[in-house]
Each structure stands twice: as structure tokens, then as C-alpha cells.
Amino acid sequence: MREFADDPPVEERIGDALRDTGATIAAAESATGGLIGSLLTDIPGSSDYFDRSVVTYSYDAKRDVLAIPREHLDEHGAVSEPVARAMARGVRDTADTTWGVATTGIAGPTGGDDEDPVGTVYIGVAYAGAWGSGESTSTVERYVFDGDRLQVKERFARQALRDALAAIEARRG
């Protein structure tokens, strides 16, 4: 599970950034199936900043656990920008953390199409600003990675942590 790890690994760097800013994070995972949470908890002391990871693989789980609107799922499908954004916001808010990160994608080997081939992932990152500040934000990025199922899952998870780390660092500086 270290095929695509940086040195130092992103899970270590994001932990340092969260600790330095006194922030917390939670993850909503679909295609990564809990891998983000696993990577984060590989780091000793991650309980200082990591709250939870919820795996919402099915449509029903996304609606039940994260309150993803049925309209998003009907109109756009689970692997889409609106769903990734709603997942990141949903986990941030239900966990009451500073940051939420979410993944929804197609790990393969089947399930892709011309618009979203196997290896496609949408990664959402949501920040909770202070109440009434209007500073809460969310972003979504779309990526397409090559590789077999396990390789793209690792790439999805590590990219999600890189995106969250970039957002944390941008807010800090």
C-alpha cells in the first residue's frame, strides 16, 4: 500500500498540518472503502486530529449517513461533482470537524464509460468556517488514474489527502 507514497508520506504531512493548526478532519469514502481512514491512522497520535471515516459505498448509505440529496444521485449519479461536494460537506458537518474530505469514483475493472472511465475519482474537500463568518468552503477536483483496482484505490486515497493538505496549507498561509 505504499506504491504511490511520497517521502515523507502525505498521511504524515497532513497530520503535522492539522496538529499545527489545531484542526480536525473526517472522511467520507466510497471508492476508497476506508483507505483514507486507514492511512491517517497509520500515523501515531492521529487521534489528535482524525475523527472518523465513514464508508458510504451504496446510494442508500450516502443518503442515510450523509444526507446526500436523492436529486444529486438521480441527476448526476454517485460518481459526480455534486455528490463529492455533498459528501465532503456532510461528513464535515456530521462529525463537527474543521475539514471533510470525500472520494467517489470508479475503481474498476468495470463500471466506467466514455465520460467517466475506470480510474475516475471526484475528490471533495470542505472547510468549516466559524458560524456566521461566511467562510465555509468546499471544492471538488476530478482525476483519472491508470492502474488496476488496488492501484487506483491507493491513488484516490493519497490524492484526497494531498488535496486536503493543499487546502489546509492555503488557509494557513
Image: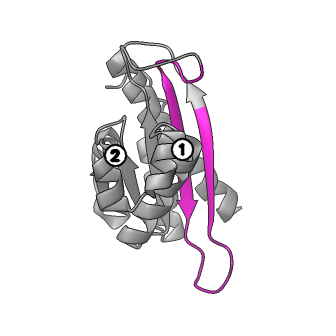
* Residue closest to the eye, 15 or 140: 140
Colour scheme shown = one colour
Q: Secondary structure at mark 2?
A: helix
Helix, strand or loop under label 1: helix
Q: Quadrant of residue 115?
A: top right
Q: Amino acid at mark 2?
A: Tyr
| Labels 2 and 1 touching (C-beta < 8 A) | no
Q: Position of residue 28 (x, y in %)?
A: 38, 51
Question: Height in image: 135 above or below 132?
Answer: above
The outermost residue toward the bottom is 132
Residue 57 location, x and y as percent? Answer: 30, 41
**Is 130 contained in the magenta span?**
yes
Residue 82: in sight, yes or no? yes
Residue 55 is left or right of residue 146, and the answer is left
Q: In the drawing, does residue 150 fall left or right of residue 137?
A: left
| Residue 135 to residue 30: above or below | below
Query: How many residues crowd around disc 1 within 10 Å: few (fewer than 14), some, or many (20 or more)?
Result: few
| Pointer 2 residue | 59
Q: What residue would you read off at disc 1?
A: 75
